[in-house]
Amino acid sequence: LAQNPADQIRLNQVGFYPNAPKQALVVGKNYENFTLIEKESHKVVYKGRIKAAVKSPFSEKYTQEIDFSNFKKNGNYILSVEKLGESYPFEIRNNALSGVAKASIKGFYYQRVSEELPEKFAGKWARKAGHADTAVLIHANAVSTNRPEGTRINSPRGWYDAGDYNKYIVNSGITMYTLLSALEDFPKTANDLELNIPESGNNLPDLLDEILVNLEWMLTMQDPTDGGVYHKLTNANFDGMVMPDKAIQPRYVVQKNTIASLDFAAVMAQASRILKPYNHKLSSRCLTSAESAWNWAKANPKVFYRQNQNNEKFKPAITTGGYEDNNDTDEWFWASAELFVTTQKSSYWEGIASTDVYWLPIQSWNSVMPLGAFSLLKAQKVLPSFTANKIAQIQNTVLQQADEMVKDLDKPLFRTVMGKSAKDFMWGSSSHAANQAMFLLQAFQLNPKKIYLEAALGNMDYLLGRNGVGYSLLTGYGSKYPMHPHHRPSIADGIDEPVPGLISGGPNPGQQDQCKYDSKVPDESFSDSDCSYASNEIAINWNAPLVYLAMALESYYH
Ligand code: 9MR
């Protein structure tokens, strides 16, 4: 089969900002010259030399860099590589990624539980409401004196987690943090993004309206009598590939635990702060809920959710997503940080004071210490002076790690921070790329070195096509994007195009799904098939850092 040259020219298939770096890569090692062609007229508008090849650390593949940063004129273009052919088309314009920013937030609208998505807002992806979640059972592993077996609770709304139809507190934790931070850090951009959702025009930013949908659900996951928070609201087993309204298995809330309660406490404390100017009453309710979840965790430390152990004792067995995490150090840190920043009560500082922060992982659903670190750094100007030494330590750590990340960016295969190491290609690797960028953007807010911002942009280019698979990993955006994500509505709705604005998990050599993959190479280990939950699912915690990144780029480059 003849190869499509466009598949060998890896670039952001959506768009470039006039005043930002513009790079593409060609897969190969002997190419010499490129031209930039105006799409309509097919006129050559810019010419250049292609750089020397760099070998993949993962395979026998080589890539060569094409740089056309000096070309700044708005328009629609194609790159042409001599002796190969033409790339997919792309734009150069101001607000080049506003479409991506909007779509990645609108993706959450499409995940809404308990409400119909009418055509007016959902277009051809209109669908009936699924899961009222008004009579959810307390699972046998979660019964308490005040809520004995057979009790039903009202826990509607929120977002479906991913390609499945369950709602998980732990994963909502980092997702909400990330979206709330985007709102806090880029308020003007948030105001400008109109999403065409039912609440549009109600005087709140659409992003906030969308956040409130899940906040409302999270609040119902707290047991009001003791403050503890249930791990998840779930079926016993994953549904078949059906639309939400056809998914009618019984729903349960399962075991209250320390990690879920701390994640909840952190989000509610943060929300209380950020919501204050918009809704005073809700803001104080969030704080009360945060403190009672914290108190529950204090009284019930080290209660971990362990699905298999539970299944031996309690029926029905629960086999949906585990989100199990046996290390609560980072959740304590995060919840302490949010509660401290919001209340400035010294009791919340103790855990922070006693934690050394000489290294931070890239944030993920089970590694949330960076979230607390970022919140402390942002608040440092208004915090009491006894916090200064600890905050200086955290700041050094973030800046040092950012410097490390942006080193030698001319060497990796895609000239991006993402993919310097094979370890970057984990389950949900796309979110890792977006979270690395978010980490760099925290550094940029502390010290506006251009390279931090440019490296964050590079990871966006990675997500939109400058990568090992040649797909823009965002459904509906670019010329070649995943058509068969592991996403029940996209599979069952009878519409060819997947629901738009959802970021695919991306390459994952773990291949835990046993689907057919064309390659085992870490950066190529991807399968655009709906069977592939390990490389081609979508998830709220993957979309959220993309929202943050797109909004950041829109506000810094515009
Ligand atoms: O994102 C999660 C990933 O880090 C884990 O390795 C994986 C296996 O436990 O689970 C992922 O989360 C899934 C969740 O358990 C259920 N909903 C879909 C999520 C994305 O695949």
Image (spheres, helix red, strand yellow):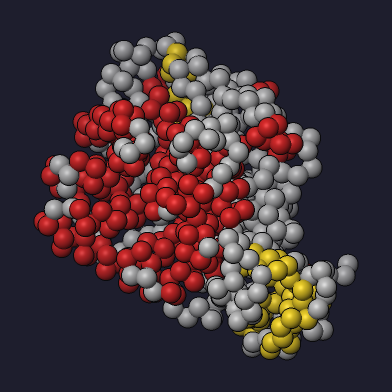
Left or right of 280? Residue 306 is right
Q: Position of residue 71 (x, y in %)?
A: 64, 79
The x, y position of residue 345, in whole percent, is 15, 42
* Near-viewer residue (381 or 231): 381
Give x and y (percent) for residue 479: 74, 59
Is residue 356 at least partly visible in the picture? no
Quick check: 175 above or below 400? above
* Quadrant housing residue 347: top left
Instruction: Say whether residue 19 is visible.
Output: yes
- Residue name at image x 39 percent, y 74 percent: 449
Which residue is at a point 69% across and 87% down the rendered structure image? 48
Report the side of 248 relative to 385 (left or right).
Answer: right
Q: Position of residue 245 (x, y in %)?
A: 66, 23
Quadrant holding the N terminus: bottom right
Q: Is residue 291 above or below residue 61?
A: above
Identify the residue at image location x=37%, y=17%: 143
**Is 1 left, or right, of 507 in this rendering?**
right
Q: Nearer the viewer, residue 423 or 169?
A: 169
Residue 170 versus residue 86 in the image, above or below: above
Foreground: 247 or 203?
A: 203
Q: Residue at x 42, y 33 (%)?
A: 215
Residue furthest out toward the left: 386
The answer to whether residue 213 is left or right of residue 72 is left
193 lies above or below 421: above
